Amino acid sequence: MITLSPNDTISTAIKLMDEKKIRHIPVVDTNQHVIGLISDRDIRDAKPSILDFTNQEKTLESPIKEIMVKDVITGHPLDFVEEISAVFSQNRIGCLPIESNGQLVGIITETDLLHTFAQLTGANQPGSQLEIKVHNRAGALADVVNVIKNHNVNIHSVLVYPDKNTQFKIVVLRVQTMNPTKIITNLKNEGYTVMWPSIPGSLS
């Protein structure tokens, strides 16, 4: 794992980021406890103007503790992905160091989150997405799944989010078929509103 100590120089951080093609580096103490974080943005803000030759070398040899973010938000290895994503969104951060027993054990970036969500939703697998409006009641999801089951089609993933009308919810399914037309027709015949995909000439 790539880390820096608070006394490492800004030029060292620049070199590491360039070599490893990364944008964030945790800063740790001798016990591997996270005490700071430095990003490419911090470095850009700290870099002297290209016209300021007198201060350029001095600035780049300054310790990163002078520019690092000290109030660092951290996560735990057992945190759920959706909880981590909420932390990213609420705090507008680009990475999250992960600590266990007060020691750095990893780091999560925005790219890691996007990759994980692609896997969780099955977006990286061949298939089709269905969005169905269902009544907000117990058993509604099971009823929809049973309709799809009758077509012998596997389901990659299921997401549920509230509709503007609290009497309904939207079920988003990723199904293992490139042609869900028969499923859509069956769902509509059962009285469901299929919001996506919309088949031309059919009623939703």
Image: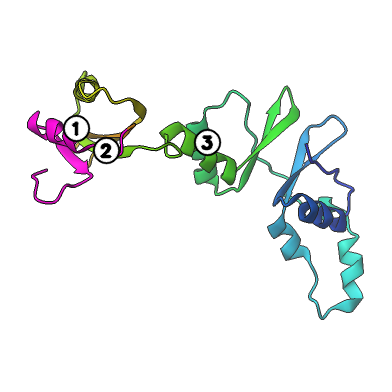
Image-based side of 128 in relation to 164, left or right: right
Q: Secondary structure at mark 1?
A: helix
* Callout 3–callout 1 Cβ contact below 8 Å: no
Residue 72: quarter of image: top right
* Callout 2–callout 1 Cβ contact below 8 Å: yes
Q: Which residue is mark 3?
A: 116
Coordinates of residue 187 in the picture (x, y in percent): 15, 31
Q: Nearer the viewer, residue 112 or 98?
A: 112
User: Is residue 182 depicted above or below 143 in this figure?
Assistant: below
Number of marks in the image? 3
Q: Secondary structure at mark 3?
A: helix
**Which amino acid type corresponds to the residue marked 2 in the rendered image?**
Leu
User: Residue 183 has which mark?
Assistant: 1
**Which amino acid type corresponds to the residue marked 3 in the rendered image?**
Thr
Q: CA distance from mark 2 to mark 3?
A: 20 Å
User: Residue 130 has which mark?
Assistant: 2
User: Is residue 198 depicted above or below 146 in this figure?
Assistant: below
Magenta part of the protein: which range? 177-204
Of callouts 2 and 1, the N-terminal one: 2
- Quadrant of the snapshot with the C terminus: top left
Q: CA distance from mark 2 to mark 1?
A: 9 Å
